[in-house]
Amino acid sequence: MSDNPGDAKLELKQASKEVKESENVAEKYSAMTVSKNSEITMNELSVSSTAFFGAVPTHKPVKKQIQFVEDKQEFSRFPTKTGRRSLSRSISQSSTDSYSSAASYTDSSDDETSPREKTQLNSKGTGDFCVKNIKQAEFGRREIEIAEQDMSALISLRKRAQGEKPLAGAKIVGCTHITAQTAVLIETLVALGAQCRWTACNIYSTQNEVAAALSEIGVAVFAWKGESEDDFWWCIDKCVNMEGWQPNMILDDGGDLTHWVYKKYPNVFKKIRGIVEESVTGVHRLYQLSKAGKLCVPAMNVNDSVTKQKFDNLYCCRESILDGLKRTTDVMFGGKQVVVCGYGEVGKGCTAALKAMGSIVYVTEIDPICALQAWVCAGAFRLVFPSGLLGNKSVVTRDQLDRMKNGSIVCNMGHSNTEIDVASLRTPELTWERVRSQVDHVIWPDGKRVILLAEGRLLNLSCSTVPTFVLSITATTQALALIELYNAPEGRYKQDVYLLPKKMDEYVASLHLPTFDAHLTELSEEQAKYLGLNKNGPFKPNYYRYKCPSHIPFKGHPNGSVMHPPQPQNELSMATSSKAFNDIKFIHFTNIFM
């Protein structure tokens, strides 16, 4: 402001003129916008659009609310209780509502009709599938092609074995996450001669466009993102119960498919030639059946293969935990206090990632060896021991949730949804507010909010993605396990659970080395003789676990004996018969809350 009175009056007059012009501009723009969107009622106007008012230079409240067209597009994916699309991220819903994502992140359709109520046909005129929208198949095909670029080992296996068709006659029913990476595995199994029917092991992890792409080529897929619990079991049943088609192989992730066939179709279960299970939850269920003498088919424990433990469980979770939390909450990790329940392979990966981002990490454990690792070997994570930390149920209880601070984030990196006691939060005194897809604010009577991700289900595949290369390792292991069990001569495998031998783990790893242009050093004959090894491997004994996963105690087999695997037969059918002498006592789980 000038000291000259005349200049001061001139500046004041000019400022007043600018204010008046800005008000006119604001009112004119508001009138134009409201007129353009006259079909939108005042009740439908988004509260969040007020956040954009700062872009309009006005000095008094604008009488007519501005509605941006982009708001409708951005927030049109979140269903309200009445079923119509909400324009706001903060519409409160009853705690009794069953939340589900209406579509995958790539689906812009406003169709709320359940896939079970639709009649859809693929381009071949067949309708033996149930997906969100078969018209998304072309987009899903592009997703699969992108995934193939980082799954060269699995593609290599496909090319090597498809001439022999080692799975000819195999009828595989699968229950896994349905993603672009899983689709590459399914198409590999089909190329090797198998017939496949598939469903999802998680109600939130299905990529709708990928499910459509698989259905388009003739794979019977029954899955969509945002299934209800009833839909989940209906889809499993549709895969198993088909007239004129009976499965003889199971590929499972979590044990739900195996449990369903065992309970509902016992005659079918008895004719299964082999089960391949990739999760610790499913493996635990298999060992329970084995100990009870009720497992009447051979099963392969893929979860405890070295390639699965070290790459999928450890390295994959180390990267995907941050991805899932960032996408859902936009949180800054530096300075946050984080409690990680469990310090197995998944816990090790999560704590390493969170600590690297500057978080103060606390670890809870029931296993003294893992606890010692957390304290001594991993950079002195602080150890805390809340009550109830036993087994795989109610790891995070209602009492602990009641005592959390306002704004705490709670999520699960375990397979099942029982680690966090979500059911205890479905009570009248608590209000649930859906703020984003897979993000709920649970509001206490005093106004405290706890941010719950994916309703307590698996965070990374429900809310983000995982590295394709890591999934290539797991998928290759699963494919080889299916080939081995299906082609094994009668009597090689008894009605029990088996581990993969070291030779197969090494073969899976060797298929992935060319990706990095890596070359192995070869032992000389003299060196191999000195070490007592075959120069072509295996290079480690079966009991060597590469930092043995201590959540699997090395005790005798449930029947009291320790069985050794038969010798490898050939490169593709390599007798994957390391007897499962590991009696799993505790489910490995990792829950994270901040």
Image (spheres, rainbow, N blue to C red):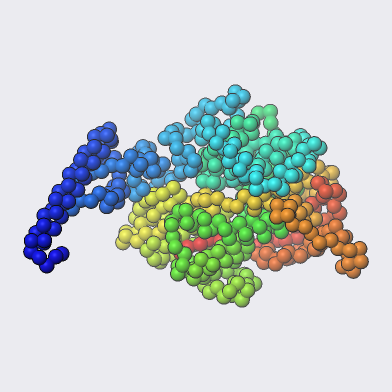
User: Height in image: 444 above or below 275?
Assistant: below
Q: Does residue 562 show up?
A: no
- Nearer the observer, 201 or 190: 190
Residue 234 percent location from the top left of the image: 55, 37
- Residue 137 as seen in the image, left or right of residue 533: left
What residue lies at 35% left-to-right and 57% top-to-bottom?
443
- Residue 478 as seen in the image, left or right of residue 392: right
Quarter holding residue 235: top right
- Residue 121 as seen in the image, left or right of residue 520: left
User: Height in image: 367 above or below 503?
Assistant: below
Q: Quadrant of the N terminus?
A: bottom left
Residue 569 percent location from the top left of the image: 86, 49
Residue 479 percent location from the top left of the image: 72, 45
What residue lies at 59% left-to-right and 63% top-to-bottom?
349
What residue lies at 41% left-to-right and 41% top-to-bottom?
77
- Nearer the observer, 168 or 393: 168
- Residue 536 as seen in the image, left or right of residue 235: right
Q: Does residue 125 show up?
A: yes
Residue 277 percent location from the top left of the image: 68, 50
